[in-house]
Image (cartoon, rainbow, N blue to C red):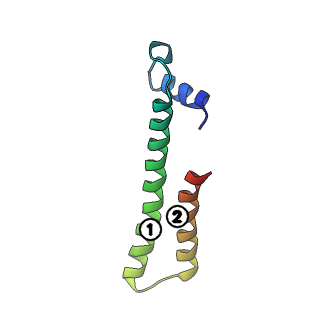
Amino acid sequence: MTKEEIIRMAREAGLDPDLWNYTDAFERFAALVAAAEREACAKMCDEKVDAEYKTGKVDHNEMAWTQACAIAIRARGQA
C-alpha cells in the first residue's frame, strides 16, 4: 500500500489527515492491519483443509489448490 492509498482510505474512514501529522507509525499500522487480514484469509484455507481431512473423503487435488491459496495469500506480505 502506498502512502497515498493509506491517506485516501483514512479519508474514506472519516479521518482527516490534515488534522494529524502523517507518520511512519500510521503506515506501519496499516501494514499490520493488512497482514492480520491476510493471515485470517490464509487460516480459512487451512481450516478448510483440516475439515476436509477429518471427513476421510479427501479430494487431494482440491486440497492442493486450497493449500496453494494459503501459501499465496501469506506470500503477498513478502512482496
Residue 26, percent from left and from top: 46, 30
* Badge 1 density bin: few <14, some 14–19, many ≥20, Cα 10 Å: some
Q: Residue at x 49, y 52 (%)?
A: 38
Q: Residue at x 58, y 53 (%)?
A: 78
Residue at the far top in the pictured view: 19
The residue under label 2 is 70
Which of marks 1 and 2 precedes in the sequence?
1
Residue 62, percent from left and from top: 55, 75
What is the C-alpha distance between the residues marked 2 and 1?
7 Å
Could you tell me the amino acid type at mark 2?
Answer: Ala
Q: Do the residues under discs 2 and 1 have CB atoms within 8 angstroms?
A: yes
Could you tell me the amino acid type at mark 1?
Answer: Asp
Q: Residue at x 49, y 18 (%)?
A: 17
* Front residue of this view, candidates 15 and 24: 24
Horizontally, residue 56 falls left or right of residue 60, namely left
* Front residue of this view, candidates 46 and 61: 46
Residue at the far bottom in the pictured view: 56
* Mark sitting on residue 46: 1
Q: Is residue 30 above or below residue 38?
A: above
Q: Is residue 40 above or below residue 59?
A: above
